[in-house]
Image (cartoon, helix red, strand yellow):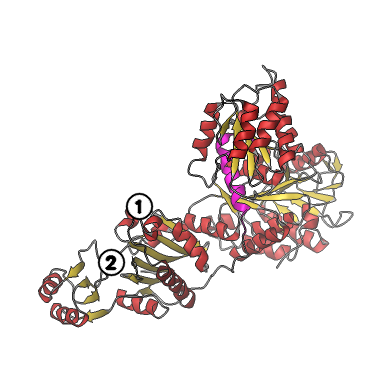
């Protein structure tokens, strides 16, 4: 069910229920920010609160309120919510805690959260256990504490699952205009994605930032991402927390490689939601996206008047998905005419101090650096302390950047190497000019990389697969291979043997050399239950007798290996089915070289992920060695995915998938459904 949150989030009348300090603060904050609508305190005995006449009940209000802040205890909250719903209120903030988030501590059998939802009916509620929201566009705040934001005409919306983090974000001094700050609480009724969709509907919102502790509804998040694509409004997320998602490393390597954190990354990437790793990067990315939007490419030009700064830019960007293209002759010629013979021309560029204070020379230099195929241009500039220094020459740099941006049409920003050397008033002024003020080099580079990633084409993804596994237990390797083979996975020729002597007969049927595996071990290699390249019946018999097993699997020996891969799928209840590709065999744990996608993924997406592996050069043919059969490899991966979608399981793993110049073969396989 999709609820209309417009009245709640953009109210013209606010009811404040409760007489405590929190409720008085809501009224005070509304007055402080200049809320122009009606404020109606509600209390059964107090005659006035915060200078406003109080009403004895919801029924006594002069009209149905657009929004209500319910700042009373959890038990009293439920009948008040019912009364607001009956009165036709636009929605309510439930401040009290102690609902579902405290259910584990309650032994009385009550379901307060269920009672709350029943009381609300179709009326939207946010929370419980949340501070509410700040609407800086319309100066409407249902917020029981101080905050650091200011009214704005356009800006970014931020939703957090932590009220304290929301307060902290409003205290930023980076110049970021925040249009809305909303706390979601425990999302009893209205989830983070539903709130986000309502905020994106506001034309004044330019981008959306999500602080996510847990993904509650994958389908709702998919719908939010689809709306963002339609509206061309980017979303970024700071995902925190690690779950106890099945870490079944004793059964397979896939689970340990594809834990919940990996599943979250794969989910956000699949939906086209940019992910950051810290609150500073969160703010810087939102600022860049608010000012110029996603970038057209990852090609960047950097300019500074110091060789140390140019080197710092290069080092900070090392390993990031950013490109600082070399200067072609036409650029070098134009730069040489401005900078003279003493400056080494490169990107990042150290233009030295020869032209410092020369507006025209700086304009010509910055303009010459800004090729039209760039995604972004950055000028490193740290501003002096305003309390001890003056900065008239720095103003010339701002003007030169503005002129170069206008001449080239390429988005540009001014980046301070330290966060504190980008004063808030300067950042605000730069934003008004359409120049991105980025505070701190490390997080600026993170923001630029993210904006470049979001600027790449992103077709509407297929719905994430959420099938439910059926059955219980772990299949034998032989049965797992048969099941995968039915979907097109290539497996070795094999025989099942009931004794060591039987294993010798089976080996002769297959033809030497063979592989012998003792059944009953999850990790056969560690248990000494795998012997390779057995070339005679005597070797097979000796190996079988030494394994301490009753039954055996005899397989053809796959030769000519180019590489060994792990291909696995793990069911992550929070994020869907995670498809993991990794260096396989004995290298799985050593290299920790893996890429993860969500099921279903296209063949092209799988191939791109394979090419991001560290062992990709080996697959392509390294130093004259033959290349692996990539098409056969892809056939096997897609067959594994097809099996999972046809017969959902908690884990499916091939390790290793042996890739040769002329094929790819699953040498070992595991399928687990339910508890092991």
Q: Which residue is mark 2?
A: 560
Quote the CA–CA distance across marks 1 and 2: 22 Å
Front in this rendered view, residue 429 or 74: 429
Residue most extreme to the top: 388
Q: Which residues are magenta?
A: 437-457
Q: Which residue is mark 1?
A: 591
Relative to 344, is 262 above or below?
below
Residue 25 lies, in percent from the top left, at: 75, 40
Residue most extreme to the right: 62
Relative to 367, is 272 above or below?
below
Q: Residue 453 shows which numbered tag? A: none
150 lies left or right of 565: right
Q: Residues within 10 Å of mark 1 (few under 14, many from 20)?
A: few
Relative to 426, is 389 above or below?
above
Specify the quadrant that holds the N terminus: bottom right
Q: Residue at x 31, y 61 (%)?
A: 585
Q: Residue at x 57, y 25 (%)?
A: 341
* N-term-proximal mark, 1 vs 2: 2
Front in this rendered view, residue 603 or 324: 324
543 lies left or right of 154: left
The quarter holding residue 188 reads: bottom right
Q: Residues within 10 Å of mark 2 (few under 14, many from 20)?
A: some
The quarter holding residue 444 reads: top right
Is residue 244 in view?
no
Query: How many discs appear?
Result: 2
Residue 448 inside the magenta-drawn segment:
yes
308 lies left or right of 219: left
The quarter holding residue 374 reads: top right
């Amino acid at each position: 069910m999709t609820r209309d949150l417009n009245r709640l989030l953009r109210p013209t009348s606010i009811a404040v229920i409760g007489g405590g300090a929190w409720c008085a603060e809501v009224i005070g904050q509304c007055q402080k920010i200049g809320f122009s609508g009606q404020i109606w305190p509600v209390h059964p005995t107090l005659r006035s609160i915060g200078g406003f006449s109080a009403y004895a009940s919801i029924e006594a209000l002069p009209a149905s309120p657009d929004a209500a802040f319910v700042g009373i205890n959890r038990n009293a909250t439920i009948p008040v919510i019912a009364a607001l719903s009956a009165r036709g209120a636009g929605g309510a903030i439930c401040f009290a805690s102690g609902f579902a988030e405290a259910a584990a501590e309650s032994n009385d059998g009550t379901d307060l959260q269920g009672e709350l939802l029943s009381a609300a009916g179709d009326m939207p509620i946010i929370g419980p256990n949340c501070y509410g929201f700040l609407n800086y566009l319309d100066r409407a705040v249902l917020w029981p504490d101080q905050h650091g934001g200011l009214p704005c005409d356009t800006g970014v919306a931020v939703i957090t699952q932590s009220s304290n983090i929301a307060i902290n974000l409003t205290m930023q001094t980076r110049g970021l205009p925040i249009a809305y700050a909303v706390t979601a609480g425990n999302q009893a009724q209205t989830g983070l994605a539903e709130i986000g969709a309502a905020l994106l509907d506001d034309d004044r919102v330019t981008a959306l930032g999500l602080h996510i502790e847990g993904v509650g509804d994958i389908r709702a998040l998919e719908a939010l991402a689809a709306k963002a694509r339609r509206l061309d409004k980017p979303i970024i997320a700071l995902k925190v927390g690690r779950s106890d998602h099945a870490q079944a490393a004793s059964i397979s390597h896939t689970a340990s490689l594809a834990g919940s954190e990996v599943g979250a990354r794969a989910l956000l990437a699949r939906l086209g939601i940019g992910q950051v790793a810290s609150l500073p990067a969160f703010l810087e990315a939102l600022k860049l996206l608010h000012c110029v939007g996603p970038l057209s490419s990852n090609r960047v030009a950097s300019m500074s008047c110091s060789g140390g700064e140019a080197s710092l830019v290069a080092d900070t960007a090392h390993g990031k998905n950013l490109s600082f293209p070399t200067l072609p002759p036409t650029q070098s010629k134009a730069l040489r005419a401005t900078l003279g013979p003493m400056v080494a021309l490169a990107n990042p560029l150290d233009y030295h101090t020869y032209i410092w204070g020369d507006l025209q020379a700086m304009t010509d230099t910055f303009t010459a650096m800004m090729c039209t195929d760039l995604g972004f241009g950055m000028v490193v500039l740290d501003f002096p302390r305003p309390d001890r220094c003056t900065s008239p020459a720095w103003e010339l740099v701002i003007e030169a950047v503005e002129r170069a941006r206008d001449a080239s049409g390429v988005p540009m920003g001014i980046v301070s190497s330290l966060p504190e050397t980008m004063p808030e008033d300067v950042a605000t002024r730069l934003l008004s000019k359409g120049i991105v003020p980025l505070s701190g080099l490390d997080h600026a580079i993170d923001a630029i990389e993210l904006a470049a990633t979001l600027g790449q084409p992103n077709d509407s993804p297929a719905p994430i697969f959420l099938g439910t596994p059926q059955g219980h237990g772990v299949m034998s390797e032989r049965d797992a291979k048969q099941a995968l083979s039915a979907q097109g996975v290539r497996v070795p020729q094999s025989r099942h043997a009931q004794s060591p002597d039987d294993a010798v007969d089976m080996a002769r049927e297959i033809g030497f050399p063979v592989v012998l595996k003792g059944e009953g071990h999850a990790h056969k290699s560690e248990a000494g239950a795998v012997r390779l390249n057995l070339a005679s019946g005597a070797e097979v018999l000796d190996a079988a007798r030494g394994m301490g097993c009753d039954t055996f699997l005899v397989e053809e020996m796959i030769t000519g290996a180019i590489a060994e891969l792990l291909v696995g799928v793990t069911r992550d209840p929070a994020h869907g089915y995670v498809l993991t590709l990794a260096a396989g065999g004995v290298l799985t744990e050593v290299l920790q070289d893996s890429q993860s996608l969500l099921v279903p993924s296209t063949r092209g997406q799988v191939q791109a992920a394979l090419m991001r592996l560290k062992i990709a050069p080996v697959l392509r043919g390294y130093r004259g060695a033959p290349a692996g059969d990539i098409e056969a490899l892809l056939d096997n991966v897609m067959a594994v995915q097809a099996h999972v979608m046809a017969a959902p399981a908690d884990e499916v793993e091939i390790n290793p998938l042996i890739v040769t110049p002329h094929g790819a073969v699953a040498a070992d396989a595991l399928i687990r459904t339910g508890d092991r």
